[in-house]
Amino acid sequence: MHHSIPRPHAGPRRRRRLLTAIVVTAVASATLSGCAPSGDAGVTTLDFFQFKGEATADFQRIVADFEAENPDIDVQLNTVPDPDTALRTLLVKGKTPDVLTVNGSGNYGQLARAGVFHDFTGDPLVEQQNPAVLDILDALGSFEGDEINALGMANNADGIVYNKQIFEEQGLEVPTTWDELIAVCDALEDAGIPAFYGTLADAWTAIPAWNALGGQLQPDDFYDDLRAEGGDVGPDSAVSFSADYTEAMEKLQTLYSYAQDGYRSRGYEDGNAAFANGESAMYLQGIWTINPILAANPDIELGVFPYPAGEDPDDVRLTSGVDVAVTIGRDTPHLAEAQRFVEYLLSPEVVDGFVESQVMFSTLADAGPNPNPVLAELVPYFDDGRIIGFIDHQIPASIPLQPIVQQYLLDGNMDAALANLDNEWRKVALRSTRTEE
C-alpha cells in the first residue's frame, strides 16, 4: 500500500488521484455483501460497515433497537476480519457503505482526504462533540483540509496502568511530574519490585509510551512542519526527529531501565498475565488492556494515570485516540436515512451504553461521568479537554516505526534510530512527490 505524505486543499483531480492511489493495491478478496439489497416496499436498506469485532454484540443490540423505532429502515450490519482491506476492496468496486464505523487512525485520514466520506459541516451533531475529539479527527486529515468527515463515538486512552494495592503497600502517590515518576520507580526498585513489566518481544508495545512522551515533548505543529519539509528532512532541516525527539527517546529508555529482568523476550500476552499476577507495579499500556487484565485477575485493583512527561502538572496531557468514529459514504443514495441512523448512534443514551460496555470514554461534550472506577483518574482530562492524539497516526504506515523504536530500546543507539526515522520520512516524501508529478 502506498502512503503519501498528507497535504491539504486537494482539488477534484487530486481527489481522484488520491483515491486511485489508495485503492489500487487493495486485495479484492472480501466477502461482504457490498451494496445493500433492495428491501420490502417502503423500507430503505442501509449497508452498515462496522470494523470493531469485539463490539459486534453491542452493535447488534443497537441496530435492533434502532430498527424497532424506525420500521422503515433496515440496517444490514457487516463486521469482517481485516476491516481496512475489506473497506478498500469495497471502494475498488465502487460499493462504499452507506454508514461506517472507522478507527481514528492514519488509514481514516487517507480516506477522508481522498473524499470518501460525507461532510458533516453544519450538522447539529457536530455541536454535541467534545471539541478536542474533533481536533484529533481533523489532525488525521479531511477532504480539502476543511471538512468534518467523521464524528467520534468512543475514545480510548493511553496511560500508565498501576496496581493500587502495591502503591498503597509501598506508601506511593500517583506521580504528576516526571521527577515524581522516577522517584516512584526508585522506591519500587529499592523494595525489590519491578516498576514496569516490559514486553519488548512485541515491538508495538513500546509505542504507547513513545506516543505519550513524544506527543507531549515535541514542538508545537511538529508534523505539519515536517510535512512542509517533505524530501528535505534531515540533520540540517528546520525540524526533524534527530533535532526534536531526543528528550522523548531518552525518557523512553529511562522507563525501560526500570522494567523487569527478561523484558526483551516477553510479549503482550505475557505482560497482561504477569501484571494481573502482581509481578510489577505499573504497566506501559492503555485502557484497552484493562479487560484482559481483569479477565486474568478479577480481584486486582487498577488505576490509570497519564504519562507525566515534564515538571509542571498543568502541562500533563492524556494521549487519546478516537477508537470508534461514525461516518457516512459521501455518495450514498440514502443520505436522509443514513443521517437518521447516525443521529441515533450518537445519541447520549446509545453512546453512554456503548462506552460503558467497551471500557472507553464518551466523545460527547456533555457526557456524564464514566461509572467505571478504573478510569476515574482520567476523567478530568477529558472534561477539561486536556488530551492529545496519537502521534504515530501522523506517520505513514510504510515507515517501520515499531521496529525502529524496538531496536533503539534494545541497543540504546538513539542517534541511529532518529536518523533512521528521518531517512524513512524523507523517502516517503520523495516517493509522494514523484507520484504527484
Image (cartoon, helix red, strand yellow):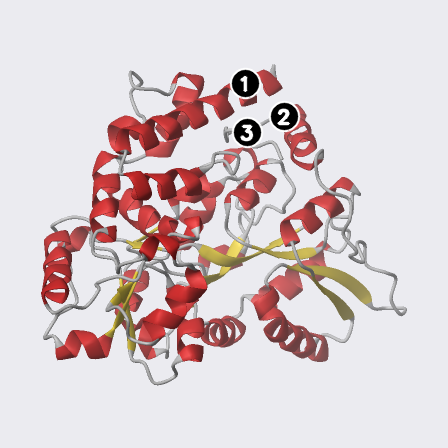
Q: Which mark is residue 4?
A: 3
Q: Residue at x 41, y 65 (%)?
A: 270
Of circles 1 and 2, the one toward us is 1
Q: Which residue is mark 2?
A: 14
Q: Quadrant of the C terminus?
A: top right
Q: Quadrant of residue 422?
A: top left
Q: Amino acid at mark 2?
A: Arg
Query: Disc 1 designates what residue?
Result: 433
Classify mark 1: residues with Cα within 10 Å, few (<14), some (14-19) or many (20+): some
Q: Amino acid at mark 1?
A: Thr
Residue 363 appears anywhere in the view: no
Q: Secondary structure at mark 3?
A: loop
Judged left or right of residue 172, residue 93 is right
Distance from the alpha carbon under mark 1 to that under mark 3: 8 Å
Instruction: Identify the element where label 2 is drawn.
Output: helix
| Residue located at (57% from left, 68% from top) | 54
Q: Is residue 317 above or below residue 341?
A: above
The one nearer the camera, 331 or 411, is 411
Q: Residue at x 26, y 53 (%)?
A: 317
Q: Is residue 5 above or below residue 361?
A: above
Q: Earlier in the sequence, mark 1 or mark 3?
A: 3
* Mark 2 or 3: the one toward you: 3
Look at the image and tell me in which quarter the N terminus lies: top right
Precedes in sequence: disc 1 or disc 2: 2
* Residue type indicated by callout 3: Ser
Mark 1 vs mark 2, CA separation in Å: 13 Å
Q: Nearer the viewer, residue 4 or 220?
A: 4
Q: Is residue 169 left or right of residue 334?
A: left
Q: Is residue 209 left or right of residue 181?
A: right
Q: Residues within 10 Å of mark 2 (few under 14, many from 20)?
A: some
